[in-house]
Amino acid sequence: MSATLEHNPELKTWARVIPATEPGQGRIERPGGFDNRVWQNRQRAPEPFELALVADLEAVFETGAEQLSDVIAGLNARHSQDRHGQPWSEESFLQEMAVLGQ
């Protein structure tokens, strides 16, 4: 019996910094070059902080928040905190999204 993994250990690192301008050239990996689990393309399992942030963001977006200020207000109304245990600010949120988006 095989164990279910929380991440994809075979995921290749994307080395390209600037996205391609030509169609079809911005692929992270060559299709068919290796076994990628279709449902799992992360390099590590999410941390509890990340899972909690996802749940809080889903709840905030369900309320109709569209502007960054509304998202921050919604997170803080839910008593969500940044990685340093502080209420979210636009700066801390944008920094976290930049880290998580890598």
Image (cartoon, grey):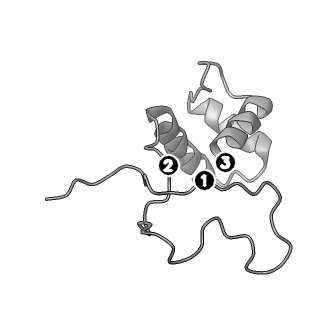
Q: Do the residues labelled 2 and 1 touch (CB within 8 Å)?
A: yes
Q: Which of marks 2 and 1 is nearer the N terminus?
A: 1
Residue 88's place in the image compared with 56, above or below, is: above
Q: Which amino acid does label 1 sit on?
A: Thr
Residue designated by label 3: 101
Q: In front of the other: label 1 or label 3?
A: 1
**Alpha-carbon span between mark 1 and mark 3:** 13 Å
Residue appearing at x 32%, y 52% in the figure: 5
Q: Do the residues labelled 1 and 3 touch (CB within 8 Å)?
A: no
Residue appearing at x 59%, y 26% in the figure: 81
Q: What residue type is labelled 3?
A: Gly
**Alpha-carbon span between mark 3 and mark 2:** 12 Å
Residue appearing at x 62%, y 27% in the figure: 82
Q: Which of marks 1 and 3 is nearer the N terminus?
A: 1
| Nearer to me, 54 or 61 | 54
- Outermost residue on the front side: it is 33
Residue appearing at x 74%, y 34% in the figure: 95
Residue designated by label 2: 43
Check disc 3: other Cα within 10 Å, few if <14, some if 14-19, many if 20+: few
Residue designated by label 1: 13
Write down the quadrant of residue 77 in the picture.
top right
Q: Position of residue 7 (x, y in %)?
A: 41, 51
Which quarter of the rendering shows the N terminus? bottom left
Q: What element carries label 1?
A: loop
Q: In front of the other: label 3 or label 2?
A: 2
Q: Is mark 3 on a helix, strand or loop?
A: loop
Residue 70's place in the image compared with 78, above or below, is: below
Check disc 1: other Cα within 10 Å, few if <14, some if 14-19, many if 20+: few
| Nearer to me, 15 or 65 | 15
